[in-house]
Amino acid sequence: MSYRIEISHQGIFFYLKKLNICLYVTASASVLSHSSDFEDKYQKIYKNIVSFLYENPKNKLALSFPGPLCSWIEKEHSEYTQLLSKISSRKQTELIGGGYYNPVFPLLFPQDRTGQIDLMTSELRKAVGKRPRGMTLFNSIWDTNLVPCFHSCGMEYVFLDSSLIPKEKRCFLPLIVNEQGKSLNILSVNREFILNPLVEPKEYLRNIFDTVNYLTKDDEYNTVKDERIVAIKIDENQFEKIYTSHWLERLYLAAQELFSESINITLPVEYLHRSDFKIHSYIPSGIQSDVAKWAKTPYKAQENNSNFQTTIFDFLLTYKRNHALYNRMLYISLLINQCKGDKIRKRIAREKLWIAQSGEGYVCNPDGVFANNAVRQYAYRSLTEAEKLIRDASGIDGFKEVATSYDYNGDGLTDYVFAMKQHNSCVTPKGAQICELDVMHNTGNYADSPSRIMQFDKVDDKYERGFFVDHLFTPEEFADYKKGSPSGTGIFSQVLFKEEDFDSYRHEIKFIGRGKFSAMNVPVSLKKRISANSNGFMVQYILKNEGPFDIKGTFVVESNFTQTDFSSARANSYKVEAISNGNVEEIDVKETSRSLKKISFVQVTDTSNDISFVYQPNEDCDLFCMPLFLRRPASYSDIPQISGTAFVNSICWNVELTPGMEIEKTIDFTIIIPKKRKAKKTKK
């Protein structure tokens, strides 16, 4: 029995002769996945995919595996790739390519784009003996400038979410786009036709056919093309459900027995090589709609009502911690591209870079669960490992410590990057703070601490939480600050400091910032000198009362340590030891805030990495520490959940300044890594 439909419109009958359906399964693999995770999914899902196709020779299904998973399967289950090869030779399946680590292609330099695609192509060719002809994109993040790259890598088509396709081109036909004389086919993925195991397969197929026939009955192509195509994505969890319920088996059976003349389940390349009709199109840059809706307001779904597509750069501008990772990734990309030394180390460094380019660290999942600290820190760690390799590959002269100034984060302001022996740091004029602190002992960015948001945390921080963030509080404001409440007027945490002098030879930058203190608006200034050394920084402050009235307050130097222990959302791996009144004290700051007076020495230790950060002020100070528990939306609850932590360590001085008077404070900040600590113990 075949199924045929006719719809009358103004006395004319239109017939859709055949609907081609391309089904493809996408597997997932986080950069945090372990071998045990792969094995579990292999037994539950991936093994069943091949078993289903092998036992049903007439069924066709395309497959998309991320690179790390493909490599793991080839290593641990070679019998699987042998079956895949056999099924592929029977033209039952087509393996879809892409970037090996599922990157966000518009964010990458051309060399990294082609490198990731070629690595994935090589892996698939090795697994099944055939190269992929098409590819998927992470969250359908698209840019027309990608066309020449994809074409040069041998890709004939790309799957794109239908929400990116201009409405007038949504005709259920393949599109063709051009850029710089290169062409690429686009197959639209229709999420409105998602497989639904609650609907009988024959009804599901009939509904698709009816819908496509109705939507295309009046388009300009119905007189020249009586075949249409629908591409449907099946994620691994969907596959598990429809496979175990035998729904998928019944779907193919219905297509073959009930709709043999009107519906054809095919493979992408098979259809494209047979079809000679494609719609010439231009597709603007964009992201699939279910992800794009999170790009306008932090952690809040909001539809795009403008005439412009939402791009990946809109997303990065909204989520500053993701943007900071992007800045770091670009910096390492430039270092690798400029390296002229050891080719082997350079190649390994580039592989580390590719790991850090996984899209998980830059974009949220479609259900609104955002890239968390663990993913970003893993990416930062990979970038640090890449930088160490490039430093080792520097040639005969070896690595030299250097300080440079340029617009590191793309905000139009000059930033200052210090590439030192034990750390790579960036200083921004916004608050004259250290906005990035990458310790070279294979760890991440310790300054990767998000700010609180009123909607979720009941508190709204008005400044970025980096290292050496400075505040000048009245006594009342300082009392609020110690309660964890926002306080003060942003002096000097929100001030845009001006450069007084930058000495790249001495690795030193001098700033000056100005503001008005208390309700009396007393003018105050802060001169800040940051001198980088191999193991840390020396930070000097000169605070001056520029007004006609006395001022009395508390000067606070705040440092915010990011979460490094991801055993739980509330985990806090930091231990604080201080010398107070000549006595050594260890402070418990796991859950609550703590303070000490008359401090001459502070050591904050990241116990998960055995790295310590030592503060030595030139005069006794007070110490205030507290954990911050950050809340964000979760897919499983309407109530914001604790999604991570930050640890605040603040050095405090009470100050009283008469008009024209100034005071000087200095802090030596030292990073102690395990090797250095062990060496000291051995020496003793």
Image (spheres, rainbow, N blue to C red):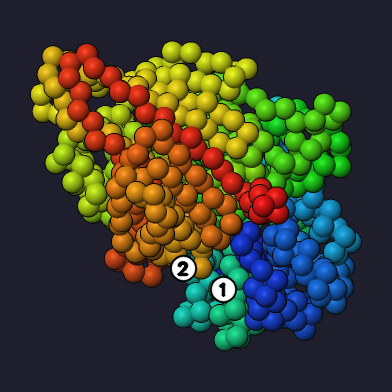
Looking at the rendered image, the disc whose residue lies closer to the viewer, 1 or 2, is: 2
Above or below: residue 43 compared with residue 27 = below
Q: Mark 1, residues whose alpha carbon is within 10 Å: few (<14), some, or many (≥20)? A: some
Residue 56 visible in rendering: no
Left or right, residue 195 beside residue 481: right
Query: How far across and how far down the image is residue 648, in percent?
Result: 37, 49
- Structural distance between the alpha carbons of marks 1 and 2: 25 Å
The single residue placed furthest to the bottom in the displayed view is 245
Q: How many marks?
A: 2
Q: Which mark is residue 608?
A: none
Mark 1, residue position? 237
Left or right, residue 360 beside residue 522: right
Q: Residue at x 75, y 31 (%)?
A: 399
Q: Residue at x 57, y 52 (%)?
A: 611
Query: How far across and how far down the image is residue 329, in percent?
Result: 61, 39
Quick one: label 1 or label 2, which is nearer the N terminus? 1
Report the front residue among 341 and 153. Answer: 341
The secondary structure type at the circle numbered 1 is helix
Q: Residue at x 56, y 15 (%)?
A: 503
Q: Mark 2, residues whose alpha carbon is within 10 Å: few (<14), some, or many (≥20)? A: few
Mark 2, residue position? 568
Under mark 2, the amino acid is Ser
Q: Quadrant of the N terminus?
A: bottom right
The image quadrant that residue 40 belongs to is bottom right
